[in-house]
Amino acid sequence: MSERETWATRAGFILAAVGSAVGLGNIWQFPFKTAQYGGATFLVVYLVAAFGIGLPAMLSEFVIGRKSNLNTIGAFERLGYRNWRVVGIVGLLTGFWILSYYSVVGGWVLRYIGGSLTGAYFGDAAAYFGAVSAGLPAVALHAVFMALVVGIVAFGIEDGIERATKLMVPSILVILVALAVWAFTLPGSGPGYAYFLSPDLSQLRLSVVFTNAFPFVAFSGPLAEIIPFAVSQAFFSLSLGMGAMITYASYIDGDESLFGDSVTIVVFNSLIGILAGLVVIPLLFAQGAEPGSGGAGALFVSVAGAFATIPFGRVVGFVFFLVVLVAALSSAISLLEVVVSYAVDNYAVSRPQVAAGLGAAIFVLGLPSAWDTAWLTWFDTLAYQLLLPLSVLGILVFVGWVFGRPAVEELLRGTGFGGGIGSLWLWLVRTVVLLGVVLTLVLGLITL
Ligand code: PHE
Ligand code: NA
């Protein structure tokens, strides 16, 4: 392969992975989870998790994908571990589950694009959110969003989305920075920065008590609640535990530094989340809202209320939600693509058929979430407290303890690093990283 082709492949891969990673997880979920679960303390745990657990886990998925060049279930088989396909299956199910409510939120975004043009949400932003985020309007929008995703995947017009992603990334940066600067100038936003950015270290506490009664262990301290959400937020946001990164890496055929790629993705993804936090959290404070009170509506209500008061608010709102839509679509496509590519590889079905069939099933699964945000919260909670940590745990156990040394060789390919770094990574995956995910899962299950 010539140098130029290799470079093109690498850029395409990073772009696709960033397109998958940057989405509603950063712009919608990260700010509201941060506001709900402790502000700066959440941010600290999130960052530690993103770099300390997410990065090694992403490398693990990349290794499985690049080494096997196969879809997320077939990959385990090709590597010689047929029974471990179950890890791939758990990932597929997790992705399926998450896409069902991801699409509901995508529907809200669609509605806000229209609402920006007409100024529909300029009056009472909270009442508007209440009206569009539940019942039939939300079901209809969920259907439209899912139809868009299915259409794009079915007709293989990802090219268009790839080009849109190229535009999306810089425009998201510009818009979020501009909104963050503007939020900074608002009276009352000041305490938002302390809440978001200055951690109270006394909150970083976790105590364990062993008991005689099931489940024989009890946790207390603020971290007991923060860890499951912050760590799983890192997985969700980095598209881990859903087969997406395995699938993307399976298309790499060159030698490239998986280290470099994953660091780029994690840094970029964190940056976008923090920027969104710098918009939403100060806005919530400026609007006099309790940080935790916004829930799933925090982004929509806070920015809508803000657009109502600025010059050219309709245009700014329109552009903002349009960019959020592109981010949401590129992520949702990557989720559906995982399942579709598995089905097309293995059964005699056409791409449009699978995409439509799966899209319909995911739509139905998302109906409760569309109908009532309480259901959406329940679906989201189950994903965070059970499915995501379980799925990532499976990946880590497989790569660390089952696949082992060959994973290190694959990881080092194209890096120029010595074996020491690879061994260190393997050791971390086997011990510290793995234990972090076990702790996340246990805490998640106990508070479920
Ligand atoms: N990472 C995406 C986001 O933050 C969500 C996603 C997860 C997309 C898994 C694809 C696969 O919005
Ligand atoms: Na993300």
Image (spheres, rainbow, N blue to C red):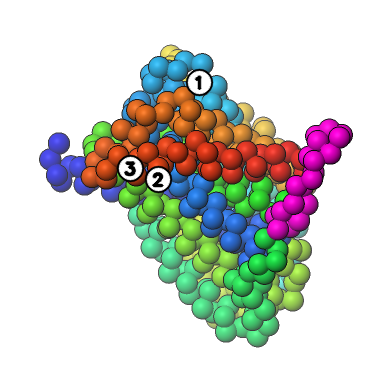
Q: Secondary structure at mark 2?
A: helix
| Coordinates of residue 129 in the picture (x, y in percent) | 71, 60
Q: Are marks 2 and 3 in contact (CB under 8 Å)?
A: no
Q: Given this view, does label 2 or label 1 mark the residue nearer the observer?
A: 1
The residue that disc 3 covers is 420
Tell me the residue at 53%/64% (across/down). 274
Q: Given this view, does label 2 or label 3 mark the residue nearer the observer?
A: 3
| Coordinates of residue 159 in the picture (x, y in percent) | 34, 43
Q: Residue furthest left?
A: 2
| Coordinates of residue 40 in the picture (x, y in percent) | 63, 66
Mark nearer the N terminus (2 vs 3): 2
Q: Quadrant of residue 193?
A: bottom right
Q: Secondary structure at mark 3?
A: helix
Mark nearer the N terminus (3 vs 1): 1
Residues drawn in magenta: 205-223
Q: Quadrant of residue 358?
A: top right
Q: Is residue 317 visible from the viewing direction of this image?
A: yes
Q: Is residue 56 rendered to the left or right of residue 36? A: left
Mark on residue 17?
2
